[in-house]
């Protein structure tokens, strides 16, 4: 299990480093959504997420809701296969948030 960190790479571009699991998503993570309002368009790069579970998908859904509330365009990049499979089961893979897949940096 690796600790979850949100790293700002550039304005509007963040890298999630660590596991997105029940064990790593805590109250602090759930209260630290302010990074989603730092730009009109935010990309969250998940290329450094080695392990995820349904808590990771739930967190992403909460990020989407929060971003909508503040009219931030939010997209995810380099989504781990495990997380994509969970998203497919619930239909979230068809949303515009999941359109940026390949590493473009």
Image (cartoon, rainbow, N blue to C red):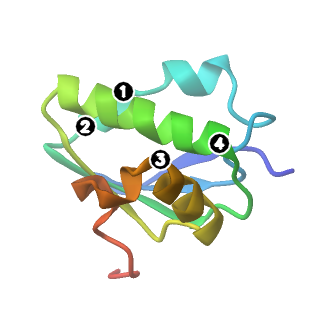
In screen coordinates, is 21 left or right of 14?
right
Query: Disc 3 vs disc 1: which is toward the camera?
Result: 3
The span from disc 2 to disc 4 (Cα, nearest Å) is 26 Å
Residue positioned 27% across, 54% down in the render:
95
- The mark found on residue 38 in the picture is 2
Helix, strand or loop at label 1? It is helix
For discs 1 and 4, the disc positioned in front in the rendered view: 4
Q: Residue at x 60, y 71 (%)?
A: 81
> On the image, numbered disc 1 is attached to which residue?
34
Which of the labelled discs sits on residue 90, or is there none?
Answer: 3
Q: Earlier in the sequence, mark 2 or mark 3?
A: 2
Inter-mark Cα distance, 1 to 4: 22 Å
- Label 2 and label 1: CA atoms lie apart by 7 Å
Q: Which sits earlier in the primary sequence, circle 3 or circle 4?
A: 4
Please say if 19 is above or below 30.
below
Which label's residue is closer to the chain start, 3 or 1?
1
Residue 28 location, x and y as percent? 62, 21
Q: How far is disc 3 from disc 4 in space, using C-alphas? A: 11 Å
């Amino acid at each position: 299990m690796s600790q979850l960190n949100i790293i700002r790479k550039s304005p509007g571009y963040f890298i999630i480093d660590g596991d997105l699991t029940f064990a790593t998503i805590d109250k602090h993570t759930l209260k630290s959504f302010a990074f989603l309002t730092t730009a009109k368009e935010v990309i969250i790069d998940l290329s450094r997420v080695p392990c995820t579970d349904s808590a990771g998908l739930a967190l992403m859904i909460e990020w989407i809701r929060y971003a909508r509330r503040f009219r931030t365009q939010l997209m995810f990049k380099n989504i781990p296969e495990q997380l994509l499979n969970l998203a497919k089961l619930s239909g979230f893979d068809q949303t515009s948030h999941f359109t940026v897949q390949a590493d473009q940096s």
